[in-house]
Image (cartoon, grey):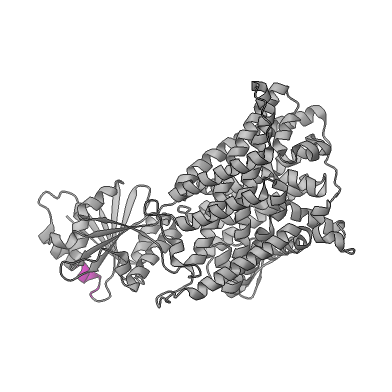
Amino acid sequence: MNKKIKNVLILSTAVLSFISFWRASAIVLCDFGSSAYYAGGIAAKAYGPSFPYFILAVMVLAGFLLMAYIESSSLFTRGGVYVVVRETMGKSMAKMSVSALIFDYLLTAPISAVSAGLYLAYFLQIILPYIHINWNINPRAVSVIFSLLIVFYFWRENIKGVKESSQNNVRIIIFVSIIAVILLILSLYTINKKGFHWPEFKFSFTDEALGFVKNIKWLKPIGLIGILMAMGHSILALSGLETLAQVYREIEDPKIKNLKKAVVVIFIFGFIFTGILTFMSGIIIPYEKIINEYSENLLSGLCMELYIPYNFKLVLKTLVVFSALLILVGAVNTAIVGANGILNRVAEDGILPDYVRKLHPKYGTTYVIITIAAVLQAVIVILSRGDVFLLGEAYAFGVLWSLTFNLLSLIFLRFKKYDQEREWKYPLNIKISEYDVPIGLIAIFLIIFSISVINLFTKKIATISGILFTAVLYIIFTISEKKQTVKEDIHRVDDEINEEKVNISTEKEISDMFKKFTKPEKILVPVRNPNNLSHLRYVLENVNDDITDIVVLYVKVERGYEYALNYDNLTDEEKYLFREVILIAEKYGKTVHPVIVFSNDPFYIVLYSAINGNFSKIVMGVSPSGGAEMQLENMAMLWGMMRPNNFKSAIEVNIIWESRMLSYKLH
């Protein structure tokens, strides 16, 4: 009998373990929050002293956009702009929108890393003479070298996996939050001592900021047009939102509740850190000084203008520069995570070659995609030559148009899938017949669409480079898709996933496998039919996976003694079964351990596993051929032959179907 159970496959993938909302927030904030260090300076140089108002307005706008991601995530566990747009507008438009978004992800890492390098370089210019080192610091050269090192570091971290690298992000956000509170308190103290005055609300657009508009006589930067132009040049403070949709699949149970918490954390942090501190900078620092001295390191400039002793200013500036290095380089990590997530959605649809999604043999990450993203980001750093304003001009094309398509798709889905259950809906809806007309979504869509159109005229570099990159990547996607001979899975119910990529580890003895499971409680969930997984859903709904190992067992029936220890040799239906298991685990945000055992006696394997693994419970689906009573009878008869003499505990067997349960205890 032992011969039947010596060969075991253990399946693993990066999405079978989950992260808290704090970690999810930290991943997003290391991009979204990082814009506090450069957005204000770039905006001030683009259109004048009114920049604090518009950076603050963008942070308010971010709150409304974050809420849209809650609704889209409630519809699609593996969501994001690609999945949402594809569902309503088709693959072609989805490929176009995701191509634009990838352009911005490739710019996010360079602009963040270069900005961090500039903060470091300007700090060295002040501090090195104090220790009698008279180096001639070239800020932009320093920023390029620093940026390349950071891209390499986070490429390596992401190869190791999002959960591991997210631990670093949490530490970064905690430290940056402390610095933000100190800056806020000292800024209020300075205003109390020096007096308060509102930043001047006037536009002074440079020729570069006007872009094509300077040659269009009837299009002037005044009134509403001027406001939209200024918003367009401030929108780079909006980076990182799409990453929220990409990390949603990693968020632990309860997913939507934890997503809401993450959204609140992200909004409060961004509003205070980016919005309020930029506003404080506009109040405390004279506009001329911002333009001439602090445009590339605005928060360092804020330190030097505070009403505190000079030595304290230097100490605070040191802390601010250190925080800038931490969060800005963290944005590089977020950009790689985001690009990886988006390209995975595209690859799952058969648009990219299968080898692109190949998993790292040790860490289970899609290392090919991660490497491609990191290399392209490094190339952009080199091409920019450390010019943060050039990168700022190129930014925002993709994020705006991807948001536009995403919001429009959510509006369409309200009518296309009006009867689909949503755990959360965007507020401000009017009930007309069976439809919830999304007035709130329509309003925010019109705002984003207006800014997107204006940006086509004002951000010349972004428009030209963005359209070219989007077109080239779209062509690559289209050609690659045509070359793929993707066999359609007849069992595929929806388009959320094609073939899940998994890592395979093997054990020669089934008892060796159980050493990996060390939690106090253990539940064994045998599976066979991909359309009969209600018992798995029951377990995931009712079990705390913090204290319980959930082992999903599939017994592959083999005749004889030769076993094919290869996942690729499974049938399409068997692969589909495990894809469904992984999708369900993602939906509930709970960790499961899929295991394949090769044998010709499934009932024997189930009981043998329960005994040797010290499982307290077996939860099974009902057999369509024999029924629940016959299943329990077979288990009881086999138990009589297999029960160990020294067995003193009990194994509870539950058979679940159609909201019914039949239970029996094996003593």
**Closer to the camera in the image, 521 or 527:** 527
Q: Verify whether residue 628 appears in magenta.
A: yes
Position of the C terminus by quadrant? bottom left
Name the outermost residue toward the right: 217
**Region of the chain picked out in magenta, as a range:** 626-632
Q: Is residue 405 above or below residue 332?
A: below
> Is residue 302 toward the left or the right of residue 483 in the image?
right
Query: Can residue 406 be seen here?
Result: no
> Is residue 426 toward the left or the right of residue 498 in the image?
right
Query: Can residue 291 be seen here?
Result: yes
Q: Is residue 426 above or below residue 545?
A: below
**Closer to the camera in the image, 638 or 330:** 330
**Picture residue at 51% right of the left edge, 75% below the top:** 482
Query: Where in the figure is residue 255, as x and y percent of width and height?
Result: 49, 55
**In which image quadrant can residue 84 be found?**
bottom right
**Closer to the camera in the image, 661 or 216:** 216
Query: Where in the figure is residue 331, as x and y percent of width and height?
Result: 59, 47
